[in-house]
């Protein structure tokens, strides 16, 4: 495989200098399965998200609390780490296509937290 600088010098198109991966000087990275389409995808390329959500969904949360004997019972949460291939992540709009200039941005996107704002008020 050509290096990034060689490819650019020759004039070939290359979208990302890391080819969308985070495999630094490693020969091989383990594969994970996409949780949507079950495609095998290298772990460093897969889109990884850590989800923590309540076991009881919001619709029946009030009924659940009313029926509970204990007054201060915190409903347990479900922690799940999801792996997705790039195709599914684009389709579900977890990641988006960026312009040539946008791809050069290396700052992390700002975190959006719904519940943090509610607690402060
Ligand atoms: Zn997929």
Image (spheres, rainbow, N blue to C red):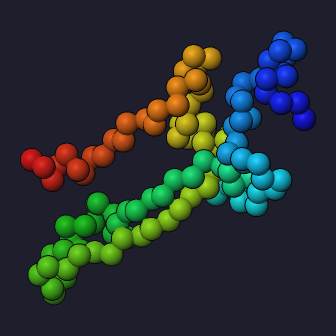
Can residue 13 be seen at all in this image of the molecule? no
Among the 4 quarters of the image, the one containing residue 110: top left
Q: Residue at x 19, y 67 (%)?
A: 62
Q: Position of residue 26 (x, y in %)?
A: 78, 53
Q: Is residue 75 left or right of residue 92?
A: left
Q: Position of residue 117 (x, y in %)?
A: 19, 46
Question: In this picture, is 55 found above or below 18?
Answer: below
Q: Residue furthest right?
A: 1
Image quarter of the N terminus: top right
Question: In this picture, is 60 found above or below 34?
Answer: below
Can residue 65 be seen at all in this image of the molecule? yes
Q: Position of residue 116 (x, y in %)?
A: 23, 50
Q: Position of residue 96 (x, y in %)?
A: 56, 31
Question: In this picture, is 115 found above or below 63?
Answer: above
Count of marks, rendered view: 0
Q: Residue at x 50, y 65 (%)?
A: 80
Question: In this picture, is 1 found above or below 28?
Answer: above
Among the 4 quarters of the image, the one containing residue 15: top right
Q: Residue at x 71, y 59 (%)?
A: 32
């Amino acid at each position: 495989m050509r290096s990034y600088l060689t490819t650019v010098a020759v004039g070939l198109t290359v979208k990302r200098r890391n080819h969308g991966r985070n495999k630094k000087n490693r020969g091989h990275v383990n594969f994970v399965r996409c949780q949507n389409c079950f495609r095998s995808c290298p772990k460093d390329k897969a889109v990884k998200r850590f989800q923590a959500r309540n076991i009881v969904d919001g619709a029946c949360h009030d009924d659940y609390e009313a029926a509970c004997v204990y007054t201060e019972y915190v409903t347990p949460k479900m922690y799940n780490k999801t792996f997705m291939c790039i195709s599914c992540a684009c389709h579900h709009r977890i990641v988006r296509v960026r312009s040539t200039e946008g791809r050069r941005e290396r700052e992390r996107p700002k975190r959006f937290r719904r519940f943090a704002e509610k607690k402060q008020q």
